[in-house]
Image: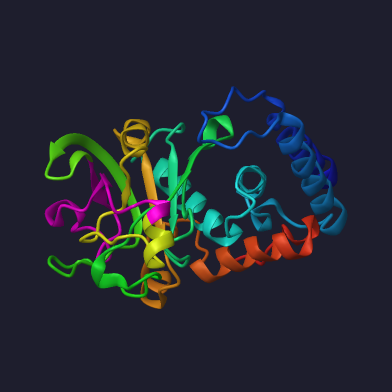
């Protein structure tokens, strides 16, 4: 009986991915339903075959959604995507955002010359944007290595942000951010850490300087795309900023509502990429 119930759950999970995707904007990456469904179905079957007696609580609840995000952004670190997805799930569970909240992910462990910002419409299985994004002057040169929640540090902050209202400021059309990570980004509004466009965020700058320009801690975008991204992300959407920062990974709370640590979430997702569908089941925290 237990086996039949578990099998039914995973069959339902695989079937849920059959919803067709609408056309992705020109800055998105197109992924047909056949591309998305196949790995999810194989993953579900692999879990059943490898762990026939595993209780449901030990199976990663984000596995199918994570697989879809990975198919949309195969160049992204699956551990970073998993951590961001868990933070989104926690925010939904806490009533901070709706089920259809969009998710932007910045991976500050990558150099500034990489397109290290992804914007996902998770509910509709779409990658809307992949863009260059600046970090703060105080965080480092081409790679950000220092992060702060303090005013005048000119450093970027880590963790989950809720997007808020737009306004016209010194950097033009901008999006205010409210950090929800206590001690790591909850001073974002008072520090005026906002999303905005900047002339120094461009491939030409990256080619000539070996890095793009740096902000005072804001996630600045190229001027040509900033308004479109801001209009997509305004009003209680989610921005998740990642770096391999020990203090934040050990004490951050935005991704910790299911009892797993950041290390467990990162390791489980990366093992999936390296070891196949049979690695979906993880040890209970």
Q: How many numbered discs?
A: 0
Above or below, 251 relative to 114 = below
Residue 280 on image: x %, y %: 72, 57
Residue nearer the viewer, 220 or 109: 220
Q: Which residues are magenta?
A: 175-204
Residue in the picture at 32% in, 73% down: 140
Residue in the picture at 70% in, 30% down: 32
Tell me which colouring the rendered structure shows. Answer: rainbow
Q: Is residue 147 visible?
A: no
Location of the C terminus (image quadrant): bottom right
Residue 78 on image: x %, y %: 60, 58
Location of the N terminus (image quadrant): top right
Q: Is residue 232 visible?
A: yes
Above or below, 41 relative to 136 = above
Above or below, 247 relative to 172 = below
**Residue that protrudes farthest toward the front in the picture:** 208
Residue nearer the viewer, 161 or 34: 34
**Residue that protrudes farthest toward the bottom in the picture:** 246
Q: Quadrant of residue 157?
A: bottom left
Residue in the picture at 65% in, 64% down: 270
**Image check: 90 left or right of 230?**
right
Q: Quadrant of residue 256?
A: bottom left
| Residue 55: in magenta span | no
Residue 92 on image: x %, y %: 42, 41
**Image check: 169 left or right of 237?**
left
Residue 246 on image: x %, y %: 41, 77
**Image check: 236 left or right of 87?**
left
| Residue 176: in magenta span | yes
């Amino acid at each position: 009986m237990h086996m039949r119930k578990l099998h039914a759950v995973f069959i339902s999970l695989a079937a849920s991915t059959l919803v067709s995707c609408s056309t992705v904007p020109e800055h998105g990456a197109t992924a047909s339903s056949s591309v998305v469904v196949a790995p999810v179905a194989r993953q579900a079957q692999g879990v059943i075959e490898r762990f026939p007696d595993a209780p449901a609580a030990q199976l990663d609840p984000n596995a199918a959604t994570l697989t879809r995000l990975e198919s949309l952004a195969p160049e992204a670190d699956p551990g970073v995507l998993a951590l961001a997805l868990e933070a989104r799930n926690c925010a939904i569970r806490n009533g901070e955002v709706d089920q259809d909240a969009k998710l932007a992910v910045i991976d500050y462990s990558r150099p500034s010359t990489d397109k290290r910002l992804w914007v996902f419409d998770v509910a509709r299985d779409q990658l809307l944007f992949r863009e260059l994004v600046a970090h703060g002057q105080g965080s480092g040169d081409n790679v950000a290595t220092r992060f702060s929640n303090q005013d005048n540090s000119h450093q970027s902050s880590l963790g989950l942000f809720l997007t808020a209202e737009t306004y016209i400021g010194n950097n033009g059309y901008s999006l205010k951010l409210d950090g929800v990570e206590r001690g790591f980004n909850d001073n974002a509004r008072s520090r005026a850490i906002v999303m905005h466009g900047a002339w120094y965020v461009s491939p030409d700058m990256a080619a000539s300087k070996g890095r793009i320009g740096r902000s005072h801690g804001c996630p600045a975008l190229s001027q040509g795309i900033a308004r479109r991204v801001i209009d997509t992300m305004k009003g209680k959407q989610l921005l998740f900023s990642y770096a391999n920062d020990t203090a934040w990974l050990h004490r951050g709370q935005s991704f910790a509502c299911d009892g797993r640590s950041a290390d467990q979430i990162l390791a489980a997702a990366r093992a999936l990429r390296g070891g196949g569908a049979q690695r979906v089941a993880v040890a209970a925290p």
